[in-house]
Image (tube, helix red, strand yellow):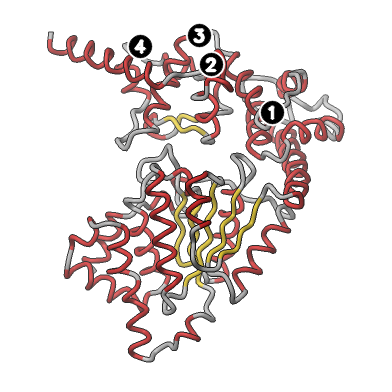
């Protein structure tokens, strides 16, 4: 059907929970996050609030929880759609593709709606270029109004079906107004008694999001990962995560570590790292990536982490870890210049430059960027077509903050100026 194909073209397949673009996604290990998952599924099976907002600071595992909820809901046959925002991924960083993505997934998961969706789009192709609110009013709400009018599904029966839509990383959608708009659209949907969806939303508790939910006129289920119970469980789960991570390193690199006495590195070290993490999975994940670098011996890398002093602020340990990783480069100035170009791209809507394009822009010899970034594999990855992917948005938060990054701070204004000069220089070279 041409209409459905058109919707797919305007959607963002990489934003879906099981997309190749997110593989491997973060997910909860077995027997972890049990309390919060139980709370979420109690909400899904309940009959009160139609929106659940899961919130907490960066790095505490919100996306892993959202991923796990999506996978379980998909197995149960109750997942309608998912959209995982990401500030460093084109198409996943704005609201432009959100509604087409949800509508396309709705057409797949609820095939009885497919024909009506397709006909609506074929009747007016401009719908896909209208505002998100207009798209919802044209493509989603009428689907369920027709059910009511035809008496094919009574409203009370609709609400017995706990169909779930998952939106993760709302704070990574660019623009405060866009974030508020998403919440207002969801509010409109849940206020429509014929729409059978429950919305699971995960984000940081940014002021504009908190305020939008504060003004929300419907019933809302709030789940904070910062409350004492979830924080205590989170720390225990980080310990489990570290234990399994070290066991995987030991198994994967058994030959070079055959002389190491097991269990490695021992409970006291894992407890120490758990304390440093303070419930932040991003810290534990970055530590494991750092230790498992193929170019280094894991016990040596572990010693470096253990020997770094303990910090005091909430992000002190993560900041200290990022600083240590950056300090390993012998080409600090060039490293920060490359990182500046990469991070600047995350604030723009255009496609990302790859390794080859950045080397041309910076007038570097082929292979320079891969050499300079060789020791940065715990914070970034060079993926297909030479695109460079940061593992977590918290790195950008760190290095673009003068107070936190200190001598590694990157000033975006300086990067803008440098790139403008580089482009002028490049154009001059080519025209000459």
Q: Residue at x 77, y 36 (%)?
A: 274
Q: Nearer the viewer, mark 4 or mark 2?
A: 2
For marks 4 and 2, the one nearer the N-term is 4
In percent of width and height, residue 50 lies at 53, 69
Q: Residue at x 41, y 16 (%)?
A: 367
**Secondary structure state at the residue bearing disc 1:** loop
For marks 2 and 3, the one nearer the N-term is 3
Q: Nearer the viewer, mark 1 or mark 3?
A: 1
For marks 1 and 4, the one nearer the N-term is 1
| Residue 115 tag number | none
Crowdedness near tag 2: few (<14), some (14–19) or many (≥20) residues, C-alpha within 10 Å: many
| Residue 313 tag number | 1
- Does residue 279 sit above or below 5 in this rendering? above
For marks 1 and 3, the one nearer the N-term is 1
| Residue 408 tag number | 2
| Residue 331 tag number | 3
Q: Nearer the viewer, mark 2 or mark 1?
A: 1
In percent of width and height, residue 90 lies at 36, 41
Measure the C-alpha gap from mark 1 to mark 3.
Answer: 29 Å
For marks 4 and 3, the one nearer the N-term is 3
In percent of width and height, residue 222 lies at 61, 59
Measure the C-alpha gap from mark 1 to mark 4.
Answer: 38 Å
Residue linked to disc 4: 364
**Secondary structure state at the residue bearing disc 4:** loop
């Amino acid at each position: 059907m041409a209409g459905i194909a058109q919707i797919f073209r305007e959607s963002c397949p990489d934003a879906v929970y099981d997309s190749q673009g997110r593989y491997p996604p973060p997910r909860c290990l077995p027997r972890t996050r049990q309390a919060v998952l139980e709370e979420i599924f109690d909400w899904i099976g309940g009959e009160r609030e139609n929106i659940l907002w899961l919130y907490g600071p960066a790095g505490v595992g919100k996306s892993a929880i959202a991923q796990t909820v999506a996978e379980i809901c998909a197995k149960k046959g109750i997942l309608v759609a998912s959209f995982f925002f990401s500030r460093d991924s084109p198409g996943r960083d704005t609201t432009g593709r959100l509604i087409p993505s949800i509508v396309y997934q709705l057409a797949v998961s609820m095939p009885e709606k497919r024909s009506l969706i397709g006909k609506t789009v074929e009747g007016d192709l401009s719908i896909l270029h209208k505002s998100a609110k207009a798209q919802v009013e044209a493509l989603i709400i009428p689907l369920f109004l027709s059910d009511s009018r035809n008496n094919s599904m009574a409203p009370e029966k609709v609400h017995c079906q706990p169909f779930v839509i998952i939106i993760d990383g709302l704070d990574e959608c660019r623009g405060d107004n866009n974030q508020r708009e998403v919440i207002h659209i969801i509010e409109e949907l849940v206020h429509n008694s014929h729409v059978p969806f429950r919305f699971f939303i995960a984000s940081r508790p940014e002021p504009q999001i908190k305020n939008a939910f504060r003004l929300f006129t419907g019933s809302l289920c709030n789940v904070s990962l910062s409350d004492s119970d979830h924080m205590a469980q989170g720390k225990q789960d980080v310990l489990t995560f570290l234990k399994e991570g070290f066991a995987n390193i030991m198994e994967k690199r058994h030959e070079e570590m055959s002389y190491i006495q097991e269990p490695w590195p021992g409970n006291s070290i894992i407890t120490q790292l758990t304390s440093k993490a303070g419930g932040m999975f991003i810290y534990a994940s970055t530590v494991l990536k750092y230790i498992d670098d193929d170019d280094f011996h894991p016990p040596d890398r572990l010693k470096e982490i253990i020997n770094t002093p303990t910090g005091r602020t909430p992000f002190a340990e993560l900041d200290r870890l990022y600083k240590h990783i950056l300090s390993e480069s012998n080409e600090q100035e060039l490293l920060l210049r490359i990182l500046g170009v990469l991070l600047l791209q995350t604030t723009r809507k255009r496609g990302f430059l790859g390794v080859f394009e950045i080397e041309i822009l910076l007038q570097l010899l082929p292979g320079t960027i891969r050499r300079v970034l060789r020791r940065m594999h715990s914070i970034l990855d060079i993926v297909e077509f030479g695109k460079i992917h940061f593992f977590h948005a918290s790195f950008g938060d760190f290095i673009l903050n003068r107070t936190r990054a200190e001598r590694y701070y990157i000033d975006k204004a300086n990067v803008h100026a440098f790139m403008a000069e580089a482009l002028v220089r490049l154009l001059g070279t080519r025209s000459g």
